[in-house]
Image (spheres, rainbow, N blue to C red):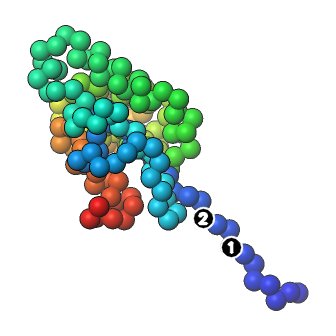
């Protein structure tokens, strides 16, 4: 018998990822890892820093708008799939212009770790596609068009800072 107190196992680091072809909040977050005590958040957002991935009018007037959103989503997901699989939770914004690609690019991620942050635009179509790729057990979070305020709230709730 010893007097030594057994050391408790360290609790694992809680990690989330937030992915959007827009930006989070007003654009005050940089892409990459944000570290907080016991927590890490991977921010993957529009590299151009634009509040909307595309000007909204472009979605309706430019026949290449969907292709532009597709390219933005593919660029955001490039090389991070294995990292995403290690996250506790993954939040992906699914808007009007990039919906199909945002959903398609998540097909290999574990649905129990996946939350789709969806605006109302073409909502039923988004739900059908999520089901088609087999992620109907993923969490669905309704949001405003653009998703920036909802994603900002998700991040602030995660880090425990309502006033960032």
**Residue 137 horizontal/vertical position (percent):** 41, 39
Residue occupying the point 17% across, 30% down: 121
Q: Quadrant of residue 31?
A: top left
Query: Along the horizontal axis of the image, is 2 left or right of 62?
Result: right
Identify the image quadrant of the N terminus: bottom right
**Residue 36 horizontal/vertical position (percent):** 47, 61
**Residue 62 horizontal/vertical position (percent):** 16, 13
The front one of 59 and 110 is 59
The front one of 27 and 100 is 27
Residue at far bottom of view:
3
Residue 119 seen by the camera: no
Q: How many marks?
A: 2
**Residue 130 horizontal/vertical position (percent):** 36, 29
Residue at far top of view:
63
Residue at far right of view:
1
Residue occupying the point 59% across, 59% down: 12
Residue occupying the point 29% across, 22% down: 69
Judging from the image, what secondary structure is the residue with disc 2 in? Answer: loop
Residue occupying the point 28% across, 36% down: 49
Location of residue 46 with respect to 115 vertically, above or below: above
Identify the image quadrant of the C terminus: bottom left
The front one of 33 and 116 is 33
Q: Count neighbours of disc 1 (C-alpha within 10 A) and say few if under 14, some if 14 to 19, many if 20 or more.
A: few
Location of residue 126 with respect to 112 vertically, above or below: above
Q: Count neighbours of disc 2 (C-alpha within 10 A) and say few if under 14, some if 14 to 19, many if 20 or more.
A: few
Distance from label 1 to label 2 (Cα)?
9 Å
Residue where numbered disc 1 is placed: 8
Judging from the image, what secondary structure is the residue with disc 1 in? Answer: loop
Q: Is there CB contact under 8 Å for labels 1 and 2?
A: no
Q: Which mark is residue 11?
A: 2
Residue 73 seen by the camera: yes
Location of residue 49 with respect to 98 vertically, above or below: below
């Amino acid at each position: 018998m010893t007097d030594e107190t057994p050391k408790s196992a360290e609790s694992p680091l809680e990690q989330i990822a937030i992915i959007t072809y827009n930006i989070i909040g007003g654009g005050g977050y940089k892409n990459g890892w944000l570290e907080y005590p016991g927590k890490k958040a991977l921010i993957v957002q529009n590299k151009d820093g634009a509040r909307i991935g595309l000007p909204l009018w472009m979605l309706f007037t430019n026949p290449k708008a969907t292709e532009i959103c597709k390219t933005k989503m593919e660029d955001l997901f490039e090389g991070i799939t294995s990292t995403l699989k290690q996250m506790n939770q993954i939040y992906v914004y699914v808007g009007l212009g990039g919906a199909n690609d945002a959903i398609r690019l998540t097909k290999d991620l574990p649905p129990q770790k996946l939350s789709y942050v969806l605006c109302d635009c073409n909502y039923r179509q988004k739900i059908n596609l999520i089901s088609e790729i087999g992620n109907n057990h993923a969490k669905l979070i309704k949001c405003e068009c653009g998703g920036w305020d909802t994603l900002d709230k998700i991040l602030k709730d995660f880090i425990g800072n309502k006033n960032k």
